[in-house]
Structures are given as C-alpha cells and as structure tokens.
Image: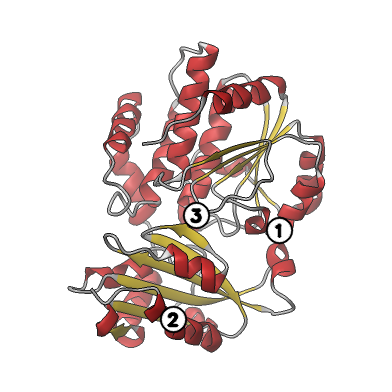
Amino acid sequence: MTQLTKPQIQQSAQLIEQSQRLVIVTHLSPDGDAMGSALGMSHWLRQMGKTQVQVIVPNPFPDFLHWMPGTDEVLDYEGNSQQANQYLQQADLIICTDFNEPKRIGCLGEQILNLSHTPKMMIDHHLQPMDFATVTISDPNSPSASELVYHLIMAIKEHLHFTQDLNMETATCLYTGMMTDTGNFSFNSNHAQMYDIIAHLVRIGIDKDAIYNQVFNAYSADRMRLMGYCLYQKMRIFPAYHTAFIFLDSKELKKFHFRSGDAEGIVNLPLQIKNIYYSCFMREDKVGPADAALAGGSEIKIKISLRSQGDRPVNLLAHDIFNGGGHKNAAGGEYYGPLPEAAQKFIEAYPNYFTQK
C-alpha cells in the first residue's frame, strides 16, 4: 500500500505552487501508463490553475492511445526538438513520470540533466531509481505510475485544502494507465487499494467499458493476422522452464503492414497456455534520433517485452541482460544490434532467472 511521506507531499505541493511553466516528460516508446500518468498529471495541474503545462514525449506513442484527452497537445521531441527545448529551458518545474533514470528518455535525458538549476519531480514505480530529482516519489510495489500520480494528487489536494474532485480528463487518463500497466487488471493487481481508486474514478464518471474498447478493441485486421502468425509460425516453447519465446524481424513486420502499437499484448498470448508462466517477445525496430546516443552506432534496435505469472519475476532479467526494468510480472528492455544476437542472449540467460517450478 503506497504511503507518501509528509516531506514528499509538502515539497511537491510547494514546487507546484511556486511554478508557472511546467513540463511533464515520460519514457521512450510511451505506453499506456506513460501517457496516462503524464496526461493525468497535466489535466490536474490545469484544474489547479496552471495554464502553462506541456507534455513532452521522447518519440511517438502508439496509435491506439491517440483517443486519450490531451494527446493533440503532446509534443514529440523526436520531431520537434527545437520547440521542446524551448519549453524545457523556460520551465519552472520538470515532472518525470514512469521512468527511474534519465537514460530511459534517450537524448531528452541529457537535456534535462543539463538543466541543473531547474527543480525536478520524479514519480515512478521501477526498481533502483536514480537520484537526479529534487523530489523522488518512488514505489516499486505500486502496479503503475498512474496509481502513484493519483496518490500524490490526492495528498496534495488534502494538503492545500483543495476540495474540487478530479475532472473527467484526469480520471480517464489515470484509469487508462492503471488498466494498461496491469493487463486489464490481470497481473500486479491483487491490491484492495487499487479497487478503491477505480471506484472513485467510476463515481467521477469514467466509462471503463468504453476505455477498454478504445485500447483493446481498436486494432486492424493486419494486427490480428500478425498475432496468428506469431502463435502458429514463430512461438517457441521451452517446457522445462515453462517459457514461451516469440521474435519478429523487420521483414515479417512489413509483411503485416506493422504500425505503432500493433505489437501491444502479443507477449501476453502464450501465458494462456497451460503450464506456461513466462513469456518473451522481441521485435526489430529502427534506432531513431531520440535514442541514437544509446545505440552505440547501431541502426537496429530490438524491443523486448517480458511477462510472467505469480511469484515469478522477469524484471531482473530485463535489468541485467537488456538494460531495462519494470515490475515483477511485466518488464522490458532494448538491445542495440541484430535480432539473432538478442535472441541468443535471451536463450542463454533465461535458465538463470526463470524457475523450473
């Protein structure tokens, strides 16, 4: 159960009260929790009277999240670095959501570290947070960054005696982040506190069924065919370790007219198989301007997703082998180099991290 300390609440409230120009940033390849936590915070700040709030993402976010309120005002650093840098230079406060260290936001991280005199607030739920922020709100036991944002908002509201409830935009974004980062509440979701939050958001008026449909029932026919191809042609099973592994190269993705977001959820599919408790999914991608500094000259990036069931962590493998992270049952990372190399690294490493039980 998340418990914020009194100093965290007081300092966060003070930073927000004193700031007029606020920038919110989130991690590379933003997912539902990244967008939910960043947009949820931005809508609440405007509700609090802050008129100059800008969300910046390092690179584009998936198409299936474009319905979320406020996405039309999000600035993509990869395509608008000059304008984004202006916002950063003028900011009184930079709020970082859903990442634990600046390298998780690519070249945008270097820009933020260079702004050493600008206060920063970090709200995150990943392991081993780096000490770079003025205020750090970190809880690896929290299922999502969006839930942490909710707790912080409610604590600041009480501290400032702000009685107005969350608006619909804030509630919708926070719920979306909570829902997507738990696989529609299928993992890391056995916490009573989470359902108290959901009840509150429903009372505000969110349509949770409509949100589900927007996220999970808005894919293309090509994406459905891609899923079938993954399961029939590409899935490898390692029964001794209850593990499934799927990987796709760029030619395969092109065959199915792949677009941003089409890979979402594929990693979860093998977990529906009896006695499969671990799943890894890799896909080939191009290195973009936002993460070129991390690539070491490689033009190829391998996106890696890991999922598990029960008391079986995958975040340690993600952290140690693929320079990534996450929480116990859902983690990810990147590998800059050829797909066969990344696949071989996983095959060599997983027996050291996954249990045979």
Mark 1 or 3, which is nearer the eye? Answer: 3
Q: Which is nearer the N-term, disc 1 or disc 2?
A: 1
Between 257 and 263, the residue placed more toward the observer is: 263
Q: Which residue is mark 1?
A: 78
Q: Which is nearer the N-term, disc 2 or disc 3?
A: 3
Q: Are marks 1 and 2 in contact (CB under 8 Å)?
A: no
From the viewer's perspective, tell me whether residue 244 is left or right of residue 53. Answer: left
* Image coords of residue 204 (percent x, y): 35, 25
Question: Which element is circle 2 on?
Answer: strand
Q: Residues within 10 Å of mark 3 (few under 14, many from 20)?
A: many
Q: Which residue is mark 2?
A: 247
Q: Residues within 10 Å of mark 1 (few under 14, many from 20)?
A: some
From the viewer's perspective, tell me whether residue 134 is left or right of residue 209. Answer: right
Between 105 and 29, the residue placed more toward the observer is: 105
**In this view, 194 is above or below 5:** below
Q: Which residue is mark 3?
A: 31
Question: Which amino acid type corresponds to the residue marked 2 in the rendered image?
Answer: Phe
Looking at the figure, which quarter contains the C terminus?
A: bottom left
Q: Residue at x 35, y 44 (%)?
A: 211
Question: Which amino acid type corresponds to the residue marked 1 in the rendered image?
Answer: Glu
How is this picture coloured? secondary structure
What is the tally of numbered marks visible in this picture?
3
**In this view, 259 is above or below 350:** above
Looking at the figure, which quarter contains the N terminus?
A: top left
Q: Which is nearer the N-term, disc 1 or disc 3?
A: 3
Quadrant in the picture for residue 49: top right
